[in-house]
Amino acid sequence: MLSRSVQAQPGASLYFSPASGTKKVGATFPIAVLVNSGGQSINAAEGEVDFDSNKLEVVSISKSNSIFNIWTTEPAFSNRNGTVNFGGGLPSPGYTGTNGTIIRITFRVKVAGAGSSTEITFASVTILANDGQGTNILSGLGRATFSIGSPALPSPTPIVTEKPATTPTTNKNITAIQVTSPSHPDQSKWYANNNPEFQWTLPADATEVLLVLGKKSTSIPTRSYIPPISNRKLDNVADGVWYFNGRIRTSTSPDLSFSYKFNVDVASPRSFEITRIDQNDPTNPQPQLSLATSDDTSGVNRYEIRLDGGDPTTVSQSLVGKSYALPVQFPGKHSIAVQAIDNAGNTATATGSFEVVSIDIPVIKSSLDKLKTGETFHVSGTAKPGYTVRLYSINKNDRKKALASVINIDNTKTTPQTEAELQKNSIQVAETKSDQEGNWDIAIPSPKSGAYTIYTRAIDDRGAISSPSNTKALSVYKPGIETILNFLNKSWQVALDFAANQWLWILLALLGIFTGMFLIKEAYPALALEFQKIRYISNEYKLHKELGTKTKKTIVELKLLNNDIKKELALLDKIEQHRGLQSDEKYLKEKLEKYLQILKTIR
Protein backbone atom coordinates (compact mmCIF):
# COMPACT_ATOMS: atom_id res chain seq x y z
CA MET A 1 0.00 0.00 0.00
CA LEU A 2 1.32 3.48 -0.91
CA SER A 3 2.13 5.99 1.83
CA ARG A 4 -0.86 8.10 2.83
CA SER A 5 1.15 11.18 3.88
CA VAL A 6 1.30 14.17 1.50
CA GLN A 7 4.87 14.73 0.30
CA ALA A 8 6.30 18.16 -0.42
CA GLN A 9 8.11 17.18 -3.65
CA PRO A 10 6.63 18.38 -7.00
CA GLY A 11 4.03 16.14 -8.61
CA ALA A 12 0.35 15.32 -8.59
CA SER A 13 -1.67 14.33 -5.53
CA LEU A 14 -5.12 13.23 -4.43
CA TYR A 15 -6.93 14.66 -1.40
CA PHE A 16 -10.38 14.80 0.25
CA SER A 17 -12.62 17.80 0.81
CA PRO A 18 -13.59 18.29 3.55
CA ALA A 19 -10.65 16.58 5.25
CA SER A 20 -11.97 16.84 8.83
CA GLY A 21 -15.06 17.55 10.97
CA THR A 22 -17.45 16.11 13.51
CA LYS A 23 -20.27 13.88 12.41
CA LYS A 24 -23.11 12.49 14.50
CA VAL A 25 -24.32 8.92 14.39
CA GLY A 26 -27.00 8.47 11.72
CA ALA A 27 -25.98 11.61 9.86
CA THR A 28 -24.98 11.63 6.16
CA PHE A 29 -22.27 13.83 4.71
CA PRO A 30 -20.60 14.27 1.29
CA ILE A 31 -16.87 14.17 0.65
CA ALA A 32 -15.15 14.96 -2.65
CA VAL A 33 -12.12 13.19 -4.13
CA LEU A 34 -10.00 15.95 -5.68
CA VAL A 35 -6.76 16.02 -7.69
CA ASN A 36 -3.96 18.58 -7.70
CA SER A 37 -1.98 18.13 -10.94
CA GLY A 38 1.08 19.88 -9.50
CA GLY A 39 1.36 22.22 -12.47
CA GLN A 40 1.47 19.37 -15.00
CA SER A 41 -1.20 18.16 -17.41
CA ILE A 42 -2.75 14.80 -16.45
CA ASN A 43 -5.10 12.58 -18.47
CA ALA A 44 -5.91 9.65 -16.16
CA ALA A 45 -6.09 8.51 -12.55
CA GLU A 46 -7.27 5.44 -10.71
CA GLY A 47 -7.31 4.32 -7.13
CA GLU A 48 -9.15 3.03 -4.10
CA VAL A 49 -10.74 4.81 -1.14
CA ASP A 50 -10.64 2.84 2.14
CA PHE A 51 -12.96 3.43 5.11
CA ASP A 52 -13.94 1.63 8.29
CA SER A 53 -17.04 -0.32 7.34
CA ASN A 54 -17.89 -0.75 11.03
CA LYS A 55 -18.31 3.00 11.45
CA LEU A 56 -19.25 4.28 8.02
CA GLU A 57 -21.20 3.11 5.01
CA VAL A 58 -21.49 4.55 1.50
CA VAL A 59 -24.91 5.81 0.52
CA SER A 60 -24.10 6.90 -3.04
CA ILE A 61 -21.38 7.91 -5.51
CA SER A 62 -21.72 10.80 -7.97
CA LYS A 63 -19.68 11.55 -11.15
CA SER A 64 -21.44 14.87 -11.63
CA ASN A 65 -19.06 17.72 -12.58
CA SER A 66 -16.13 15.29 -12.76
CA ILE A 67 -13.10 16.33 -14.80
CA PHE A 68 -13.14 12.81 -16.31
CA ASN A 69 -15.47 11.76 -19.12
CA ILE A 70 -13.95 8.33 -19.81
CA TRP A 71 -14.15 5.62 -17.15
CA THR A 72 -11.82 2.60 -17.28
CA THR A 73 -13.15 1.48 -13.89
CA GLU A 74 -16.71 2.57 -13.23
CA PRO A 75 -16.91 4.07 -9.71
CA ALA A 76 -18.29 1.41 -7.37
CA PHE A 77 -18.36 0.73 -3.63
CA SER A 78 -18.45 -2.24 -1.30
CA ASN A 79 -19.75 -1.57 2.24
CA ARG A 80 -18.82 -5.14 3.01
CA ASN A 81 -15.12 -4.52 2.21
CA GLY A 82 -15.05 -0.83 3.12
CA THR A 83 -13.80 0.26 -0.33
CA VAL A 84 -14.62 2.62 -3.20
CA ASN A 85 -12.87 1.97 -6.53
CA PHE A 86 -12.58 4.33 -9.50
CA GLY A 87 -10.55 4.84 -12.64
CA GLY A 88 -11.04 7.47 -15.32
CA GLY A 89 -9.47 9.85 -17.77
CA LEU A 90 -9.97 12.51 -20.41
CA PRO A 91 -8.56 13.23 -23.86
CA SER A 92 -5.63 15.54 -24.60
CA PRO A 93 -4.85 18.27 -23.55
CA GLY A 94 -5.87 16.72 -20.24
CA TYR A 95 -6.39 18.60 -16.97
CA THR A 96 -4.17 21.11 -15.21
CA GLY A 97 -5.28 22.57 -11.86
CA THR A 98 -5.35 22.26 -8.07
CA ASN A 99 -8.91 21.15 -7.27
CA GLY A 100 -10.24 18.94 -10.03
CA THR A 101 -13.20 16.87 -8.88
CA ILE A 102 -13.02 13.17 -9.70
CA ILE A 103 -16.02 11.76 -7.74
CA ARG A 104 -18.21 12.67 -4.75
CA ILE A 105 -19.01 10.08 -2.09
CA THR A 106 -21.90 10.34 0.39
CA PHE A 107 -21.28 8.52 3.69
CA ARG A 108 -23.60 7.67 6.61
CA VAL A 109 -22.27 7.38 10.15
CA LYS A 110 -23.26 3.99 11.57
CA VAL A 111 -21.91 4.02 15.11
CA ALA A 112 -19.49 6.00 17.25
CA GLY A 113 -17.25 3.03 18.08
CA ALA A 114 -14.02 3.01 20.05
CA GLY A 115 -12.01 6.21 19.88
CA SER A 116 -15.02 8.19 18.57
CA SER A 117 -13.21 9.00 15.30
CA THR A 118 -12.64 7.44 11.89
CA GLU A 119 -10.25 7.87 8.96
CA ILE A 120 -10.80 7.80 5.21
CA THR A 121 -7.66 7.08 3.18
CA PHE A 122 -6.36 6.29 -0.33
CA ALA A 123 -4.72 3.11 -1.60
CA SER A 124 -3.34 1.80 -4.96
CA VAL A 125 -3.38 5.22 -6.62
CA THR A 126 -1.96 6.07 -10.04
CA ILE A 127 -1.96 9.54 -11.67
CA LEU A 128 -0.76 9.59 -15.29
CA ALA A 129 0.80 12.57 -17.03
CA ASN A 130 -0.48 13.69 -20.44
CA ASP A 131 2.98 13.14 -21.97
CA GLY A 132 2.25 10.30 -24.40
CA GLN A 133 4.24 7.89 -22.21
CA GLY A 134 1.73 7.32 -19.39
CA THR A 135 4.22 8.49 -16.73
CA ASN A 136 2.99 8.05 -13.15
CA ILE A 137 3.57 11.45 -11.48
CA LEU A 138 1.93 10.67 -8.14
CA SER A 139 3.78 12.46 -5.31
CA GLY A 140 1.33 12.55 -2.43
CA LEU A 141 -1.95 11.28 -0.93
CA GLY A 142 -4.19 13.05 1.51
CA ARG A 143 -6.47 11.64 4.21
CA ALA A 144 -9.64 12.72 6.01
CA THR A 145 -10.30 12.33 9.78
CA PHE A 146 -13.74 12.78 11.34
CA SER A 147 -14.84 12.76 14.98
CA ILE A 148 -18.05 10.87 15.67
CA GLY A 149 -20.37 12.37 18.26
CA SER A 150 -23.47 11.06 20.00
CA PRO A 151 -26.70 11.13 18.06
CA ALA A 152 -29.21 13.94 18.66
CA LEU A 153 -31.69 11.42 20.10
CA PRO A 154 -30.93 8.38 22.25
CA SER A 155 -30.30 5.25 20.32
CA PRO A 156 -33.53 3.30 20.06
CA THR A 157 -31.96 -0.04 20.92
CA PRO A 158 -28.50 -1.37 21.72
CA ILE A 159 -28.74 -3.90 18.83
CA VAL A 160 -26.29 -1.85 16.80
CA THR A 161 -23.51 -3.01 19.11
CA GLU A 162 -23.92 -6.50 17.69
CA LYS A 163 -22.61 -5.48 14.26
CA PRO A 164 -18.93 -5.22 15.21
CA ALA A 165 -19.12 -8.80 16.39
CA THR A 166 -19.89 -9.96 12.83
CA THR A 167 -16.80 -11.45 11.17
CA PRO A 168 -16.02 -9.21 8.14
CA THR A 169 -15.61 -11.01 4.85
CA THR A 170 -12.38 -9.14 4.21
CA ASN A 171 -10.68 -11.33 6.79
CA LYS A 172 -11.74 -14.52 5.02
CA ASN A 173 -8.87 -16.57 3.58
CA ILE A 174 -8.31 -16.09 -0.16
CA THR A 175 -6.72 -18.72 -2.42
CA ALA A 176 -5.30 -17.91 -5.83
CA ILE A 177 -6.59 -19.93 -8.78
CA GLN A 178 -5.50 -20.19 -12.39
CA VAL A 179 -7.25 -18.41 -15.25
CA THR A 180 -6.58 -19.10 -18.91
CA SER A 181 -7.10 -17.10 -22.11
CA PRO A 182 -7.61 -18.85 -25.47
CA SER A 183 -7.15 -15.50 -27.23
CA HIS A 184 -4.07 -14.31 -25.29
CA PRO A 185 -2.43 -17.52 -24.01
CA ASP A 186 1.05 -16.08 -23.26
CA GLN A 187 1.05 -13.25 -20.72
CA SER A 188 4.47 -12.03 -21.88
CA LYS A 189 3.54 -11.66 -25.57
CA TRP A 190 1.68 -8.98 -27.51
CA TYR A 191 -1.43 -9.79 -29.53
CA ALA A 192 -3.18 -7.93 -32.35
CA ASN A 193 -6.51 -8.83 -30.79
CA ASN A 194 -8.55 -6.40 -28.70
CA ASN A 195 -11.33 -8.86 -27.85
CA PRO A 196 -9.75 -11.01 -25.12
CA GLU A 197 -11.43 -14.10 -23.69
CA PHE A 198 -10.89 -15.62 -20.24
CA GLN A 199 -11.90 -18.89 -18.59
CA TRP A 200 -11.70 -20.22 -15.04
CA THR A 201 -13.14 -23.08 -12.99
CA LEU A 202 -15.83 -22.42 -10.38
CA PRO A 203 -15.89 -24.39 -7.11
CA ALA A 204 -19.12 -26.19 -6.21
CA ASP A 205 -20.00 -23.67 -3.48
CA ALA A 206 -19.37 -20.50 -5.55
CA THR A 207 -21.97 -17.81 -4.84
CA GLU A 208 -20.65 -14.68 -6.61
CA VAL A 209 -17.93 -13.58 -9.05
CA LEU A 210 -16.42 -10.10 -8.91
CA LEU A 211 -14.42 -8.81 -11.90
CA VAL A 212 -12.45 -5.72 -12.88
CA LEU A 213 -10.32 -4.64 -15.87
CA GLY A 214 -7.52 -2.38 -14.73
CA LYS A 215 -3.98 -1.21 -15.31
CA LYS A 216 -2.64 -2.86 -12.16
CA SER A 217 -2.62 -6.36 -10.76
CA THR A 218 -3.85 -4.94 -7.44
CA SER A 219 -7.01 -3.38 -8.88
CA ILE A 220 -9.89 -4.61 -6.75
CA PRO A 221 -12.76 -6.48 -8.50
CA THR A 222 -16.08 -4.67 -8.07
CA ARG A 223 -18.37 -5.79 -10.89
CA SER A 224 -20.64 -8.47 -9.42
CA TYR A 225 -22.03 -11.50 -11.28
CA ILE A 226 -24.76 -13.51 -9.53
CA PRO A 227 -25.17 -16.33 -10.36
CA PRO A 228 -21.41 -16.71 -10.80
CA ILE A 229 -19.91 -17.01 -14.30
CA SER A 230 -16.92 -19.09 -15.44
CA ASN A 231 -15.86 -17.13 -18.55
CA ARG A 232 -15.86 -13.60 -19.87
CA LYS A 233 -15.15 -11.97 -23.25
CA LEU A 234 -14.25 -8.28 -23.45
CA ASP A 235 -14.75 -6.15 -26.56
CA ASN A 236 -12.68 -3.32 -28.05
CA VAL A 237 -10.11 -3.09 -25.29
CA ALA A 238 -7.70 -0.20 -25.84
CA ASP A 239 -4.05 -0.85 -26.73
CA GLY A 240 -1.72 -1.35 -23.80
CA VAL A 241 -0.90 -3.62 -20.86
CA TRP A 242 -3.96 -4.75 -18.90
CA TYR A 243 -4.88 -6.88 -15.90
CA PHE A 244 -8.05 -8.91 -15.70
CA ASN A 245 -8.64 -9.44 -11.98
CA GLY A 246 -11.32 -11.55 -10.36
CA ARG A 247 -12.59 -12.86 -7.02
CA ILE A 248 -14.89 -15.82 -6.46
CA ARG A 249 -16.97 -15.74 -3.30
CA THR A 250 -17.92 -19.07 -1.77
CA SER A 251 -20.26 -20.19 0.97
CA THR A 252 -17.93 -22.47 2.94
CA SER A 253 -14.47 -22.80 1.37
CA PRO A 254 -11.91 -19.99 1.11
CA ASP A 255 -12.62 -17.30 -1.49
CA LEU A 256 -10.65 -17.60 -4.75
CA SER A 257 -8.87 -14.82 -6.65
CA PHE A 258 -6.97 -14.42 -9.91
CA SER A 259 -5.10 -11.78 -11.89
CA TYR A 260 -4.27 -12.26 -15.58
CA LYS A 261 -1.99 -9.91 -17.47
CA PHE A 262 -2.54 -9.48 -21.22
CA ASN A 263 -1.09 -7.18 -23.87
CA VAL A 264 -3.06 -5.61 -26.72
CA ASP A 265 -1.69 -3.85 -29.79
CA VAL A 266 -3.88 -3.60 -32.89
CA ALA A 267 -2.24 -0.50 -34.36
CA SER A 268 0.38 -0.66 -37.12
CA PRO A 269 3.84 0.88 -36.75
CA ARG A 270 4.12 4.47 -37.93
CA SER A 271 4.47 5.03 -41.67
CA PHE A 272 8.02 5.60 -42.90
CA GLU A 273 10.19 6.10 -45.98
CA ILE A 274 13.23 4.29 -47.35
CA THR A 275 16.20 6.64 -47.56
CA ARG A 276 19.37 5.90 -49.55
CA ILE A 277 22.37 7.37 -47.76
CA ASP A 278 25.10 6.95 -50.44
CA GLN A 279 23.49 9.18 -53.06
CA ASN A 280 26.93 10.49 -54.07
CA ASP A 281 28.13 7.04 -55.18
CA PRO A 282 25.65 5.54 -57.66
CA THR A 283 28.09 2.73 -58.57
CA ASN A 284 28.18 1.38 -55.01
CA PRO A 285 27.20 -2.31 -55.38
CA GLN A 286 25.85 -2.37 -51.81
CA PRO A 287 23.53 0.65 -51.50
CA GLN A 288 23.36 2.07 -47.97
CA LEU A 289 19.82 2.44 -46.61
CA SER A 290 18.38 4.07 -43.52
CA LEU A 291 15.37 2.33 -41.96
CA ALA A 292 13.60 4.18 -39.17
CA THR A 293 10.08 3.95 -37.78
CA SER A 294 8.46 3.39 -34.39
CA ASP A 295 5.53 1.65 -32.79
CA ASP A 296 3.77 3.41 -29.93
CA THR A 297 2.62 0.32 -28.04
CA SER A 298 4.51 -2.95 -28.45
CA GLY A 299 7.55 -1.59 -30.31
CA VAL A 300 9.11 -2.58 -33.65
CA ASN A 301 10.38 -6.17 -33.62
CA ARG A 302 12.15 -6.41 -37.00
CA TYR A 303 12.23 -5.37 -40.63
CA GLU A 304 11.89 -7.57 -43.72
CA ILE A 305 13.39 -6.45 -47.05
CA ARG A 306 12.40 -7.79 -50.47
CA LEU A 307 14.53 -6.91 -53.49
CA ASP A 308 13.04 -7.20 -56.97
CA GLY A 309 10.16 -9.32 -55.62
CA GLY A 310 12.47 -11.98 -54.18
CA ASP A 311 12.45 -13.75 -50.82
CA PRO A 312 12.51 -11.53 -47.71
CA THR A 313 15.68 -10.81 -45.75
CA THR A 314 15.26 -10.10 -42.02
CA VAL A 315 16.92 -7.03 -40.53
CA SER A 316 17.33 -6.80 -36.77
CA GLN A 317 15.67 -4.01 -34.79
CA SER A 318 19.15 -3.10 -33.51
CA LEU A 319 19.95 -1.62 -36.95
CA VAL A 320 17.09 0.88 -36.82
CA GLY A 321 18.34 4.37 -37.59
CA LYS A 322 21.74 3.05 -38.65
CA SER A 323 23.19 2.45 -42.10
CA TYR A 324 22.19 -0.91 -43.56
CA ALA A 325 24.15 -2.25 -46.55
CA LEU A 326 22.22 -4.32 -49.09
CA PRO A 327 23.81 -7.44 -50.62
CA VAL A 328 25.85 -6.89 -53.80
CA GLN A 329 23.54 -5.79 -56.62
CA PHE A 330 23.98 -5.98 -60.41
CA PRO A 331 23.89 -2.74 -62.41
CA GLY A 332 20.44 -1.48 -63.29
CA LYS A 333 17.19 -0.42 -61.63
CA HIS A 334 15.90 -2.41 -58.67
CA SER A 335 12.64 -2.38 -56.70
CA ILE A 336 12.62 -2.59 -52.91
CA ALA A 337 9.89 -3.20 -50.32
CA VAL A 338 10.57 -2.86 -46.58
CA GLN A 339 8.06 -4.14 -44.04
CA ALA A 340 8.24 -3.03 -40.39
CA ILE A 341 6.72 -5.63 -38.03
CA ASP A 342 5.86 -4.86 -34.41
CA ASN A 343 5.83 -7.32 -31.52
CA ALA A 344 2.14 -8.07 -32.08
CA GLY A 345 2.60 -8.87 -35.79
CA ASN A 346 1.12 -5.62 -37.13
CA THR A 347 2.93 -4.30 -40.20
CA ALA A 348 3.70 -1.10 -42.09
CA THR A 349 5.24 -1.25 -45.57
CA ALA A 350 7.35 1.24 -47.52
CA THR A 351 8.26 0.75 -51.18
CA GLY A 352 10.69 2.40 -53.54
CA SER A 353 13.36 1.87 -56.16
CA PHE A 354 17.05 2.56 -56.64
CA GLU A 355 19.60 2.26 -59.42
CA VAL A 356 23.13 0.87 -59.41
CA VAL A 357 25.20 2.43 -62.20
CA SER A 358 27.63 0.07 -63.94
CA ILE A 359 31.36 0.54 -63.49
CA ASP A 360 33.45 0.76 -66.69
CA ILE A 361 32.64 -2.18 -68.98
CA PRO A 362 35.56 -4.23 -70.39
CA VAL A 363 35.97 -4.73 -74.14
CA ILE A 364 36.96 -7.96 -75.94
CA LYS A 365 39.49 -7.03 -78.65
CA SER A 366 40.75 -10.41 -79.84
CA SER A 367 39.16 -13.86 -79.77
CA LEU A 368 39.28 -16.95 -82.03
CA ASP A 369 36.06 -18.03 -83.71
CA LYS A 370 37.13 -21.71 -84.17
CA LEU A 371 39.01 -24.00 -81.83
CA LYS A 372 39.93 -27.66 -81.52
CA THR A 373 39.09 -29.42 -78.27
CA GLY A 374 42.18 -29.57 -76.08
CA GLU A 375 43.73 -26.38 -77.47
CA THR A 376 44.34 -23.36 -75.28
CA PHE A 377 41.79 -20.60 -75.79
CA HIS A 378 43.10 -16.98 -75.72
CA VAL A 379 40.91 -13.93 -75.25
CA SER A 380 42.32 -10.42 -74.82
CA GLY A 381 40.98 -6.91 -74.45
CA THR A 382 40.94 -3.71 -72.40
CA ALA A 383 39.45 -2.62 -69.07
CA LYS A 384 40.02 -0.01 -66.41
CA PRO A 385 43.51 -0.55 -64.89
CA GLY A 386 43.42 -2.77 -61.80
CA TYR A 387 39.98 -4.23 -62.48
CA THR A 388 39.36 -7.95 -62.25
CA VAL A 389 38.08 -9.24 -65.60
CA ARG A 390 35.83 -12.29 -65.43
CA LEU A 391 35.32 -14.26 -68.67
CA TYR A 392 32.27 -16.43 -69.31
CA SER A 393 32.00 -19.14 -71.97
CA ILE A 394 28.36 -20.29 -72.25
CA ASN A 395 27.19 -23.34 -74.22
CA LYS A 396 24.44 -22.16 -76.58
CA ASN A 397 22.74 -25.58 -76.51
CA ASP A 398 22.25 -25.42 -72.71
CA ARG A 399 21.91 -21.68 -72.19
CA LYS A 400 19.29 -21.80 -69.40
CA LYS A 401 21.38 -24.09 -67.21
CA ALA A 402 24.55 -22.10 -67.92
CA LEU A 403 22.97 -18.73 -67.08
CA ALA A 404 21.66 -20.11 -63.77
CA SER A 405 25.22 -21.08 -62.92
CA VAL A 406 26.45 -17.60 -63.93
CA ILE A 407 23.99 -15.94 -61.55
CA ASN A 408 25.14 -18.19 -58.72
CA ILE A 409 28.81 -17.43 -59.44
CA ASP A 410 28.28 -13.66 -59.58
CA ASN A 411 26.10 -13.55 -56.46
CA THR A 412 28.59 -15.49 -54.35
CA LYS A 413 31.62 -13.82 -55.97
CA THR A 414 33.27 -17.23 -56.34
CA THR A 415 34.04 -19.53 -59.25
CA PRO A 416 33.57 -23.31 -59.56
CA GLN A 417 36.63 -25.13 -58.24
CA THR A 418 36.97 -27.99 -60.75
CA GLU A 419 36.95 -28.38 -64.51
CA ALA A 420 34.42 -31.20 -64.11
CA GLU A 421 31.98 -28.86 -62.39
CA LEU A 422 32.44 -26.28 -65.13
CA GLN A 423 31.69 -28.80 -67.86
CA LYS A 424 28.70 -30.12 -65.93
CA ASN A 425 27.20 -26.62 -65.72
CA SER A 426 27.82 -25.95 -69.45
CA ILE A 427 29.92 -22.93 -68.57
CA GLN A 428 33.56 -21.99 -68.25
CA VAL A 429 34.70 -19.08 -66.09
CA ALA A 430 38.15 -17.56 -65.70
CA GLU A 431 39.53 -14.36 -64.18
CA THR A 432 42.52 -12.08 -64.57
CA LYS A 433 43.62 -8.55 -63.62
CA SER A 434 44.02 -5.75 -66.12
CA ASP A 435 47.51 -4.21 -66.09
CA GLN A 436 48.51 -0.57 -65.58
CA GLU A 437 47.64 0.23 -69.21
CA GLY A 438 44.28 -1.53 -68.90
CA ASN A 439 45.24 -4.52 -71.06
CA TRP A 440 44.29 -8.08 -70.13
CA ASP A 441 44.67 -11.56 -71.57
CA ILE A 442 43.01 -14.79 -70.47
CA ALA A 443 44.17 -18.28 -71.54
CA ILE A 444 42.00 -21.27 -70.68
CA PRO A 445 41.64 -24.83 -71.99
CA SER A 446 38.93 -25.15 -74.62
CA PRO A 447 35.56 -26.52 -73.48
CA LYS A 448 33.90 -29.59 -74.95
CA SER A 449 32.85 -29.47 -78.58
CA GLY A 450 29.92 -27.24 -79.43
CA ALA A 451 28.88 -23.63 -80.08
CA TYR A 452 29.63 -21.02 -77.39
CA THR A 453 29.04 -17.35 -76.61
CA ILE A 454 31.96 -15.48 -75.00
CA TYR A 455 31.63 -12.28 -72.94
CA THR A 456 33.21 -10.60 -69.89
CA ARG A 457 32.35 -8.49 -66.85
CA ALA A 458 34.62 -6.26 -64.75
CA ILE A 459 34.79 -6.37 -60.93
CA ASP A 460 36.32 -3.62 -58.79
CA ASP A 461 37.78 -3.83 -55.27
CA ARG A 462 34.35 -3.21 -53.68
CA GLY A 463 32.83 -6.19 -55.48
CA ALA A 464 30.89 -4.03 -57.95
CA ILE A 465 30.13 -6.03 -61.11
CA SER A 466 29.86 -4.27 -64.47
CA SER A 467 27.29 -4.82 -67.18
CA PRO A 468 28.25 -7.49 -69.78
CA SER A 469 30.80 -6.64 -72.46
CA ASN A 470 30.51 -7.20 -76.20
CA THR A 471 30.12 -10.88 -77.16
CA LYS A 472 32.09 -13.23 -79.41
CA ALA A 473 31.07 -16.53 -81.01
CA LEU A 474 33.23 -19.65 -80.65
CA SER A 475 32.95 -23.01 -82.46
CA VAL A 476 34.78 -25.93 -80.79
CA TYR A 477 35.27 -29.27 -82.63
CA LYS A 478 37.25 -32.45 -82.06
CA PRO A 479 40.78 -32.71 -83.70
CA GLY A 480 39.95 -35.64 -86.08
CA ILE A 481 37.17 -33.65 -87.69
CA GLU A 482 39.54 -31.13 -89.31
CA THR A 483 41.24 -33.74 -91.52
CA ILE A 484 37.87 -35.01 -92.68
CA LEU A 485 36.67 -31.48 -93.39
CA ASN A 486 39.79 -30.69 -95.44
CA PHE A 487 39.34 -33.92 -97.38
CA LEU A 488 35.69 -33.11 -98.09
CA ASN A 489 36.59 -29.60 -99.19
CA LYS A 490 39.26 -30.83 -101.67
CA SER A 491 36.99 -33.63 -102.90
CA TRP A 492 34.28 -31.12 -103.76
CA GLN A 493 36.76 -28.92 -105.60
CA VAL A 494 37.99 -31.86 -107.73
CA ALA A 495 34.46 -33.12 -108.30
CA LEU A 496 33.26 -29.74 -109.50
CA ASP A 497 36.17 -29.42 -111.97
CA PHE A 498 35.76 -32.88 -113.50
CA ALA A 499 32.10 -33.68 -113.02
CA ALA A 500 31.07 -34.94 -116.47
CA ASN A 501 28.24 -37.24 -115.74
CA GLN A 502 25.25 -37.53 -113.45
CA TRP A 503 26.48 -40.67 -111.60
CA LEU A 504 29.45 -38.83 -110.09
CA TRP A 505 27.12 -36.16 -108.70
CA ILE A 506 24.88 -38.83 -107.16
CA LEU A 507 27.90 -40.59 -105.63
CA LEU A 508 29.21 -37.36 -104.16
CA ALA A 509 25.76 -36.48 -102.78
CA LEU A 510 25.45 -39.88 -101.06
CA LEU A 511 28.94 -39.49 -99.62
CA GLY A 512 27.98 -36.05 -98.27
CA ILE A 513 24.78 -37.34 -96.67
CA PHE A 514 26.53 -40.30 -95.04
CA THR A 515 29.36 -38.14 -93.73
CA GLY A 516 26.94 -35.48 -92.46
CA MET A 517 24.89 -38.01 -90.52
CA PHE A 518 28.03 -39.43 -88.96
CA LEU A 519 29.59 -36.12 -87.97
CA ILE A 520 26.70 -33.71 -87.41
CA LYS A 521 26.51 -34.20 -83.63
CA GLU A 522 30.19 -33.47 -82.94
CA ALA A 523 31.11 -31.18 -85.82
CA TYR A 524 27.94 -29.30 -86.68
CA PRO A 525 29.31 -25.74 -86.23
CA ALA A 526 32.36 -26.41 -88.42
CA LEU A 527 30.52 -28.59 -90.98
CA ALA A 528 27.87 -25.92 -91.44
CA LEU A 529 30.58 -23.47 -92.41
CA GLU A 530 32.26 -25.95 -94.85
CA PHE A 531 28.96 -26.89 -96.50
CA GLN A 532 28.28 -23.18 -96.92
CA LYS A 533 31.60 -22.82 -98.75
CA ILE A 534 30.86 -25.84 -100.95
CA ARG A 535 27.52 -24.32 -101.93
CA TYR A 536 29.19 -21.05 -102.91
CA ILE A 537 31.84 -22.92 -105.01
CA SER A 538 29.12 -24.97 -106.75
CA ASN A 539 27.22 -21.81 -107.63
CA GLU A 540 30.40 -20.25 -108.96
CA TYR A 541 31.03 -23.30 -111.24
CA LYS A 542 27.48 -23.22 -112.59
CA LEU A 543 27.76 -19.51 -113.27
CA HIS A 544 30.91 -19.96 -115.39
CA LYS A 545 29.27 -22.83 -117.31
CA GLU A 546 26.18 -20.77 -118.12
CA LEU A 547 28.26 -17.81 -119.24
CA GLY A 548 29.79 -20.01 -121.96
CA THR A 549 26.40 -20.19 -123.73
CA LYS A 550 25.31 -16.62 -123.41
CA THR A 551 21.97 -15.73 -125.01
CA LYS A 552 19.58 -12.79 -124.89
CA LYS A 553 17.61 -14.57 -122.21
CA THR A 554 20.77 -15.07 -120.22
CA ILE A 555 21.57 -11.34 -120.36
CA VAL A 556 18.19 -10.48 -118.81
CA GLU A 557 18.72 -13.07 -116.09
CA LEU A 558 22.22 -11.70 -115.43
CA LYS A 559 20.81 -8.24 -114.85
CA LEU A 560 18.31 -9.63 -112.35
CA LEU A 561 21.10 -11.57 -110.68
CA ASN A 562 23.21 -8.39 -110.55
CA ASN A 563 20.40 -6.55 -108.69
CA ASP A 564 19.86 -9.44 -106.24
CA ILE A 565 23.58 -9.54 -105.41
CA LYS A 566 23.59 -5.80 -104.72
CA LYS A 567 20.62 -6.18 -102.34
CA GLU A 568 22.34 -9.00 -100.48
CA LEU A 569 25.52 -6.92 -100.14
CA ALA A 570 23.52 -3.94 -98.82
CA LEU A 571 21.92 -6.16 -96.19
CA LEU A 572 25.32 -7.51 -95.11
CA ASP A 573 26.64 -3.93 -94.80
CA LYS A 574 23.82 -3.08 -92.40
CA ILE A 575 24.49 -6.18 -90.31
CA GLU A 576 28.19 -5.31 -90.20
CA GLN A 577 27.44 -1.79 -88.91
CA HIS A 578 25.14 -3.15 -86.24
CA ARG A 579 27.09 -6.03 -84.74
CA GLY A 580 29.92 -7.14 -87.02
CA LEU A 581 29.89 -10.17 -89.31
CA GLN A 582 30.41 -13.80 -88.33
CA SER A 583 33.02 -15.83 -90.30
CA ASP A 584 30.47 -17.44 -92.64
CA GLU A 585 28.87 -14.06 -93.32
CA LYS A 586 32.26 -12.57 -94.19
CA TYR A 587 32.91 -15.46 -96.60
CA LEU A 588 29.52 -14.90 -98.24
CA LYS A 589 30.22 -11.19 -98.69
CA GLU A 590 33.58 -11.89 -100.35
CA LYS A 591 31.98 -14.31 -102.83
CA LEU A 592 29.11 -11.97 -103.66
CA GLU A 593 31.53 -9.15 -104.34
CA LYS A 594 33.55 -11.49 -106.61
CA TYR A 595 30.37 -12.50 -108.51
CA LEU A 596 29.48 -8.85 -108.94
CA GLN A 597 32.89 -8.16 -110.48
CA ILE A 598 32.47 -11.09 -112.88
CA LEU A 599 29.07 -9.80 -114.00
CA LYS A 600 30.52 -6.37 -114.72
CA THR A 601 33.12 -7.87 -117.09
CA ILE A 602 30.54 -9.64 -119.28
CA ARG A 603 27.92 -6.94 -119.65
Image (cartoon, rainbow, N blue to C red):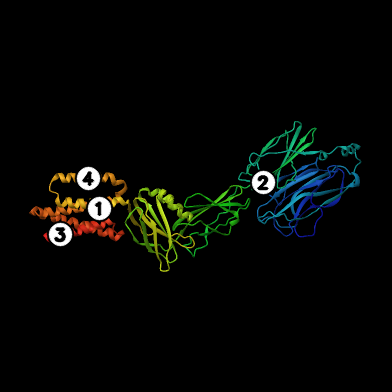
**Residue 168 percent across, percent down from the top left:** 83, 39
Q: Residue at x 70, y 39 (%)?
A: 179
Which label lies toward us, 3 or 1? 1
For the C terminus, the quadrant is bottom left
Residue 374 vertical position relative to residue 207 in the rendered view, above or below: below
**Are circles 3 and 4 on residues that touch, CB within 8 Å?**
no
* Labels 3 and 4: the sequence-earlier one: 4
Q: Is residue 542 left or right of residue 291?
A: left
Which label lies toward us, 2 or 3? 3
Q: Dot 4 corresponds to which residue?
A: 511
Nearest the eye: 352 or 379: 379
Which label lies toward us, 4 or 2? 4
Q: Secondary structure at mark 4?
A: helix
Residue type indicated by callout 4 = Leu
Q: CA distance from mark 4 to mark 1?
A: 15 Å
**Are circles 3 and 1 on residues that touch, CB within 8 Å?**
no
* Labels 4 and 2: the sequence-earlier one: 2
Residue type indicated by callout 3 = Ile
Q: CA distance from mark 2 to mark 1?
A: 84 Å
Nearest the eye: 363 or 139: 363
Q: Secondary structure at mark 2?
A: loop
Q: Dot 3 corresponds to which residue?
A: 598
Q: Is residue 361 left or right of residue 560?
A: right
Residue 50, visible in the rendered structure: yes
Q: Dot 1 corresponds to which residue?
A: 486
Q: Dot 2 corresponds to which residue?
A: 188
Q: Residue at x 22, y 45 (%)?
A: 511
Q: Is residue 9 left or right of residue 550?
A: right
Residue 157, visible in the rendered structure: no
* Labels 3 and 1: the sequence-earlier one: 1
**Are circles 2 and 3 on residues that touch, CB within 8 Å?**
no
Give the residue at the far bottom of this rendering: 437
